[in-house]
Image (cartoon, rainbow, N blue to C red):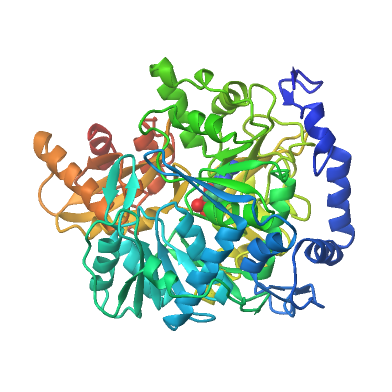
Amino acid sequence: MAANPAEKKETVFYYPPVDFVKNAAIPGMDAYRALCRAAEENYEGFWEELARENVLWHKPFTKVLNDTNPPFYKWFEDGELNVSWNCLDKHLANGNAEKDAIIFEADDGTVTKVTYRQLHERVCRLANGLKSLGVGKGDRVVIYMAMSIEAVVAMQACARIGAIHSVVFGGFSAPSLGERIVNAGAVAVITADMQIRGGRRLPLKAIVDEALALNDNHTVKNIVVYRRTGDGIPFTEGRDCWMDELMARQSAECEPEWVDAEHPLFILYTSGSTGNPKGAQHASGGFLLWAIMTMRWTFDIKPSDVFWCTADIGWITGHTYNAYGPLATGATILLFEGVPTYPHAGRFWEMIDKHKVSIFYTAPTAIRSLIKASSEDNRVAPEHYDLSSLRLLGSVGEPINPEAWLWFYRHIGKERCPIVDTFWQTETGGHVIAPMPGATPLVPGSCTLPLPGLSVSVVDETGQELPWGQGGILVINRPWPSMIRTVWGNDERYKTHYWPEELGGRLYQAGDGAIRDPQTGYFTITGRIDDVLNVSGHALGTMEVESVLSAHPMVAEAAVVGKPDDLTGESICAFVILKNELPKGEAAKHIASDLRKWVSREISPIARPKEIRFGENLPKTRSGKIMRRLLRVIARGEEITQDISTLENPAILEQLRQSL
Ligand code: PRX
């Protein structure tokens, strides 16, 4: 797969290797274009055929798309299915019962495997166990667990009985967890006694107790606890039970609950530019279909693959590409409990070597930190490991800078593995723009072209499509099966946030800016156009962090902006005005450290500001609006070239600049 300085000046394309193309699901650009054309010519027919061929229906659908009440679209609405049945029972029936479904590597390196038959049995037992506690179809279950076989079992068990899961990332604090439990109206929480990451223990169950204690309006009746370490933890009689004891009492068979295609499969909270996190609600049929199709198209999944997606199940990537997509396509997945740098920064490469991973999907942040680590200490360099099992690499969560792309390509993929840079979001359910590895010529730093069936454009503020070469707002032009259905309990927020009136109300606004290459039409994502930050591939609302900072007893006002960061992509810079006088020297350091701890405790360590600057005021317009664009410039240490004539208090700029 040699780089070919192609005709177009400056752009270097990286072509798929011949061997890869030969066996690829989409072998070449003609095949890709044919699929795109099929979708353009008969949109519903295209999706209908995919849904009939790739999803197992208990009762086949007769309607494809219901668009009578936009933007509340319905897909395959009169079809009935069960997602867990599609992920498990299917493989028992087709002779794959003894195939490894999950290879789990614990933080300390211990490896545990489960076959599809064993996974099926565990899911059935927990599903029956949940039913015995009174959890049923449509009930919400919050899952607060670390990466583990049991976490996948918990998600699949909910799907099996038609309960709606809402996984909360194990790094979220008690207040964040509590807020989500209350918003979802959860009747049960599934958690673990402890979580182990990088050699450290985090008491998950105790955090659940704290979250519930903070909210006397919660509706939780039961807590099911996975015994990760067996550490003694407080138990509330009648409410709490051990997962293993609950499962041991159950039958190993559980008839799935057949649900309508539109039945919610899960709610996953994501940060918005304003207010509280929003619960993105996904539907069973459409989500499953796109999880399957993207496994086949973007990841070219084959029965012999060992697929490793490093994303935690607390994020959408862990939902679509750990808990559902790979299982629905009968793959073997690797799940990892730990962190890439423990006990050493060669852990990822060691695990690829040890488990013969063939498809490796990770985030640019991880790649950048491992580049740094191996340049500082050659002992953890990928060259010390056998990575010849790899055939495909993937990147997700944030733009991958060309330097990191090239390092990944050369040092990990050894110039033989295509890289799929996948752009998508919690709300899209699965990939939106990504190369097809056996077809698309790759350009570092570009996620290239939309997946077949997805119609994506770059438009101006009125919704008019812009010519290639002009940057604008990224939109999706038509509803697609795996799209978010609504914001849980808040239809209005769904409508106004994602389908803005300014763009005509019929375009899905992703929240990102983009530009298309004038020659190839390839997309490059230029970053969020709203106040959502992307730290290490995790979306965080500026408002969320600001309101937590402002709630600190010492703080009068706070504003938060993003700043480019070599490792985490973007980092948080907070401008803080204290109620008392401006702190100096050691006192300022102390307060800043306190504020960082406060944010960690209230939201999560991810939200901790890297930089905190104190000032007497914030730059405001005469009408009192904080001028964040000026704060961004100050945070980056750039010269202010913008018009500041509307600024009420220009002197403050100099003070904030000096405050570092
Ligand atoms: O800004 C885009 C960025 O991550 C946002 C979505 O975040 P979240 O819902 O947490 O889902 C992350 C995993 C899918 C997007 O709006 N983003 C995600 N992937 C890419 C990306 N930006 C550039 N390139 C990508 N490949």
Rendering quarter of residue 550: bottom left
Residue at image point 47% right, 35% down: 366
Placement of 434 over or under 408, stated as above or below: below
Residue at image point 33% right, 62% down: 176
Work out which quarter of the rendered image holds the C terminus and state it: top left
Q: Is residue 480 visible?
A: no
Work out which quarter of the rendered image holds the N terminus and state it: top right
Image position of 373 (left or right of 317): left
How many numbered discs?
A: 0
Placement of 156 over or under 262, stated as above or below: above
Looking at this view, name the residue that lies furthest to the bottom: 134
User: Which x, y percent locates residue 542?
Assistant: 38, 53
Rendering quarter of residue 53: bottom right
Residue at image point 80% right, 39% down: 24
Image position of 344 (left or right of 78): left
Placement of 380 over or under 424, stated as above or below: above
Which of 86 and 371 lies nearest the eye of the viewer?
86
User: Which x, y percent locates residue 485?
Assistant: 61, 70
Which of 283 and 36 lies nearest the eye of the viewer?
283
User: Which x, y percent locates residue 57?
Assistant: 75, 72
User: Which x, y percent locates residue 19?
Assistant: 80, 29
Image position of 501 (left or right of 235): right
Image position of 496 (left or right of 419): left
Looking at this view, name the residue that lies furthest to the top: 378
Q: Is residue 362 visible?
A: yes
Which of 199 and 560 lies nearest the eye of the viewer?
199
